[in-house]
Image (tube, grey):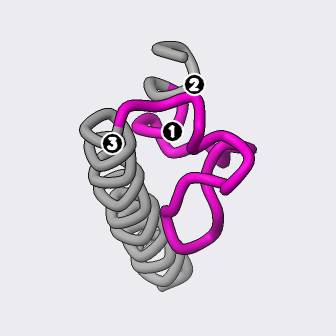
Amino acid sequence: MICEVLCVLAGYESSIFTDDSQIIPEFLPLLHPGEAQTLESLAALAAKYRKVKKAANHFKTLYDEH
């Protein structure tokens, strides 16, 4: 589980979370509500990181072309 969370925070996709940073329903019964809330917060943070990284790469590409 820790490895999965670290990979998500590093910007990789995960099979535990949906596209909107929610935990898949099949996995929820295995977690304490506090754990689920924390994981969803981390997934939301990771999604923001991926968006910033994608935007930065886009601008870098535009800069490199000129």
Q: Residues within 10 Å of mark 2 (few under 14, many from 20)?
A: some
Residue 33 is marked as: 3
* Disc on the earlier residue, 2 or 3: 2
Give the magenta-colored segment's residue range.
Answer: 7-32
Give the foreground label among 3 and 1: 3
Q: In the figure, 40 relative to 14: above or below?
A: below
Instruction: Name the residue type under label 3.
Output: Pro
Q: Nearer the viewer, residue 20 or 26?
A: 26
- Secondary element at tag 1: helix
Residue 4: x and y, percent? 57, 24
Give the side of residue 3 with respect to residue 56, left or right: right
Q: Which amino acid is tagged 1?
A: Val
| Residue ID at (46%, 14%) | 2
Give the image location of residue 19, x and y in percent: 63, 70
Which callout, 3 or 1, points at the residue further toward the start of the chain?
1
> Which numbered marker is on residue 4?
2
The residue most toward the top is 2
Q: Quadrant of residue 48?
A: bottom left
